[in-house]
Amino acid sequence: MEAVKFLKVDSTSLPEADQDFNGQKIKILGQPVGLNDAATVNFVDHRIGQRTFHVNREGAQEKLKMNNNVICGLANPTERNDVVHKHYVDSQIEYLQGLVTNLTRQVDALQTRVVRL
């Protein structure tokens, strides 16, 4: 069995491997400052709450600025003015390309039949 190593609170010793807390929680964290600092659920929920946009279902006339943030988790559209996700657009383009290919084949076949007549 490997010897138990302790980390000093004064940061004079650093972990040499991943730490297993045996299912225990880390509690009472300070506010994160650096990009790699740990954060509490409350901190994250509060920050996400600040970025959550509530849009009037009846159709708000205001512009929604996303400041280069991504909108994700969109449902498939059901109304003509619904916002759509990239996968939906790509699938519609693929479907239309298939229709064009089939129509082109049908036109070619009809032209061949007309030439024979």
Image (spheres, helix red, strand yellow):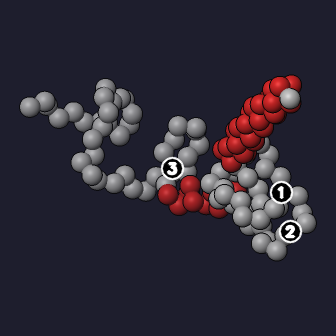
- Frontmost of labels 2 and 3 is 2
Residue 52, picture quadrant: bottom right
Tag 3: amino acid: Ala
Which residue is disc 3 drawn over?
A: 39
Judging by the rendered image, the residue that carries numbered circle 2 is 60
The residue that label 1 is drawn on is: 64
Which residue is at a point 77% across and 35% down the rendered structure image? 106
- Tell me the crowding category of disc 2: few under 14, some 14 to 19, or many 20 or more residues within 10 angstroms, Cα based: few
Question: Which of the 4 image quarters holds residue 69?
Answer: top right
Closer-to-camera residue (46/53): 53
Q: Amino acid at mark 2?
A: Ala
From the viewer's perspective, tell me whether residue 21 is left or right of residue 54.
Answer: left
Residue drawn where x is 56% and y is 55% of the image: 44
Quadrant occupied by the C terminus: top right
The image shows residue 96 at horizontal and vertical percentages of 75, 41
Do tag 2 and tag 3 residues touch (Cβ < 8 Å)? Answer: no
Mark 3 burial class by Cα count in 10 Å: few <14, some 14-19, many 20+: some
Query: How many residues crowd mark 1 within 10 Å: few (<14), some (14–19), many (20+)?
Result: few
Q: Looking at the image, how many numbered discs can be counted on the residues? A: 3
Which comes before the other along the chain, label 1 or label 3? 3
Q: Which is nearer the N-term, disc 2 or disc 3?
A: 3
The amino acid beneath tag 1 is Leu
